[in-house]
Amino acid sequence: MLKPVLRSLSVVLIVFTFFAILHIGAHNARGDNTGWDNPEAIKNAAETLDRVMKEEARERKYGKSDDSDSGPMGVLILSGIIIAVGWAIIASKRKKEATQARETKRKQEQKKLHTNRLAHAISLGFSVENEIKKCPACAEKIKLEASTCRYCKKEFLDDQIDIVIQDKIDNFLADHKSA
């Protein structure tokens, strides 16, 4: 989902940059394509530069008029904003991926710990098949590993089942330590 957005932002940025370059080129050359070694081109460029400097001096003195063009700076600023937003999106995605990787690693370590504790409990005589739990919805007794209550059809998440199993293992191991 994020890739099409980034692709769209990239296309917009490229288009804006392209038009900014064209706009800057138009401001600098004013349509002249004969080169800067041509005396007429140099004269036109000097006139354009003089006119632009006068406009800037007038804008500094009286403020910018509403009908004036924002020029290439507006396009470049907009391009910069688009780049900043793109980088923020990329940074957010990387942060999310790093968080997911840490969470996955934590779950793997937790599962390994639970597996080791289960193996230890089984070596002491614990049996998951013989254990039962009470359904929180209908209070009927069902198998410990059941993902759906056979009486009321309530479904249990894997995490809920793991918690109940770990509680039973904790109780079993506590009973064996005290014995």
Image (tube, helix red, strand yellow):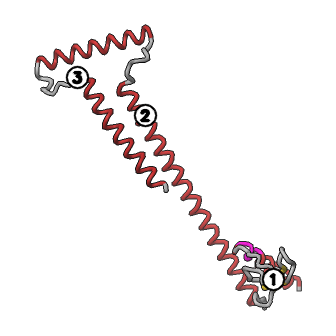
Toward the viewer: 160 or 173? 160
Mark 1 surroundings: few (<14), some (14-19) or many (≥20) residues within 10 A: few
Mark 2 surroundings: few (<14), some (14-19) or many (≥20) residues within 10 A: some
Mark 3 surroundings: few (<14), some (14-19) or many (≥20) residues within 10 A: some
In the rendered image, residue 171, in percent from the top left (x then y), is placed at 84, 80
* Majority secondary structure of magenta residues: helix
Q: Mark 3: which secondary structure?
A: loop
In the rendered image, residue 117, in percent from the top left (x then y), is placed at 72, 80
The residue where tag 2 is placed is: 78
Q: Is residue 71 above or below residue 108?
A: above
105 on left or right of 85: right
Q: Is residue 1 above or below residue 30?
A: below
User: Can you see residue 124?
Assistant: no
Q: Residue at x 27, y 32 (%)?
A: 22
Q: Mark 1: which secondary structure?
A: loop
Whether the residues at callouts 1 and 2 have beta carbons within 8 Å, the answer is no
- Identity, as a three-letter code, of the amino acid under mark 3: Arg
In the rendered image, residue 128, in percent from the top left (x then y), is placed at 76, 87
- Identity, as a three-letter code, of the amino acid under mark 1: Tyr
How much space separates mark 3 and mark 1, taking CA atoms? 84 Å
Q: Residue at x 67, y 72 (%)?
A: 110
- What mark, if any, has residue 30 been given in the picture? 3
Q: Mark 3 or mark 1, which is nearer to you?
A: 1
Q: Which residues are magenta?
A: 159-163
39 on left or right of 73: left
User: In the rendered structure, which disc, 3 or 1, sits on the residue that comes first in sequence?
Assistant: 3
- Identity, as a three-letter code, of the amino acid under mark 2: Leu
